[in-house]
Image: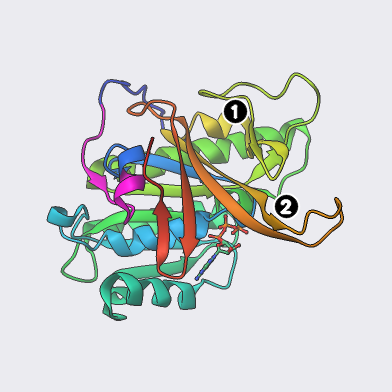
Amino acid sequence: MVPFRAENPLDLPNRKCTVGCPNLDALLGGGVPCASVTELASESGCGKTQICLQLLLCAQLPESRGGLSSASLCLFSEPPFPLRRLQSLSLSFFGTNDPLDHIYVRGVHSADDLLATLDRVDSLLSNPPSSLPIGLIVIDSIAALFRSDFDNNPVDLRRRSNLFFRIASKLKAQARRHGAAVVVTNQVVDVVGSDGGVRVGNYAWLGSSGRRACPALGLAWANCVNTRLFLSREEVVVASDGASEESARVCRTRRWIRVAFAPHLPDSAREFVIVREGVFGFLGS
Ligand SMILES: Nc1ncnc2c1ncn2[C@@H]1O[C@H](COP(=O)(O)OP(=O)(O)OP(=O)(O)O)[C@@H](O)[C@H]1O
């Protein structure tokens, strides 16, 4: 078992990878921090994958443009990998498909497979296949790996927590040793009951699609990530013929990204949009 080391919360990472939008970078204090694990949590369809794809591309930008001058690695657990979306973003950001040469992609099908893959990632980080070092590791999604393989009994819960800690400890060690940014995506579960869930960071729960939700995988996993960003969405009526409640309505999806906790960021949020050209945040108030 890998020993867990206490972290100094004042030992703040300062190298960041741009998300590809100055307004989202402003929310994040410059981008996603290196040598640290950042989680994007949301219900389905909020934009986690789209932000990850944008980051995979932005890591290649030179430092003068907020990037890491690095290649990146994406481990995905819900096939198929969205190559068309990545190509479309690449065309929009770089005007070419070439940047895809510096994105390494691999499917993982279980938590044990992820752990074994991370062992092999060590040598990939030490001896990158191209001239660019690997500066960003994305895991999309971590929750999917834990969804079906575990029952709700004490033995499985202990095995699950044990795997969380081993995966997180490996990711943190790799992030620190190689100065890489690690981004993982997580799903959410509905919060039931009147008192909400266990408060983690700034919130016990957050609203999305009119429901109360909190990130999946519970307290054990929450303690494994350094920064948690929560994405939410709501359908809003932008036009209605006004005749009755059931009358014709035009709806639009509004999306927000919120800092649920981070050692280096205040509690804040930004509205954002997903368009063909990418993910873009609104100007802060
Ligand atoms: N090229 C595009 N143009 C406009 N909107 C897009 C585009 N690609 C994706 N979207 C929007 O992004 C949403 C899906 O985002 P994404 O797949 O990143 O969500 P997610 O949070 O990763 O969901 P899941 O948990 O199911 O993987 C879609 O519902 C769609 O509205």
Residue occupied by mark 2 = 148
Q: Which mark is residue 174?
A: none
Comparing marks 1 and 2, which lies closer to the viewer?
1
> Residue flagged by tag 1: what amino acid is it?
Leu
Q: Quadrant of the C terminus?
A: top left
> Residue flagged by tag 2: what amino acid is it?
Ser
Measuring from the top left, give residue 6's x and y in whole percent: 37, 22
Secondary structure of residue under mark 1: helix
Q: Which mark is residue 219?
A: 1
Nearer to the camera, 39 or 155: 39
Measuring from the top left, give residue 74's x and y in whole percent: 42, 62
Nearer to the camera, 280 or 141: 280
Badge 2: residue crowd in 10 Å (few <14, some 14–19, many ≥20): few
**Residue located 61% across and 55% down the image:** 253
- Residue 65 shows in the view: yes
Real-space Cα separation, disc 1 to disc 2, in angstroms: 19 Å
Query: Reading the chain from its start, which is encountered first: label 1 or label 2?
Result: 2
Compared with residue 223, is residue 82 higher up or lower down, i.e. above or below?
below
Nearer to the camera, 265 or 115: 265
**Residue located 63% across and 57% down the image:** 252
Magenta stretch bounds: 12-25
Secondary structure of residue under mark 2: loop
Q: Quadrant of residue 45?
A: bottom right
- Residue 140 shows in the view: no
Left or right, 37 with reference to 114: left
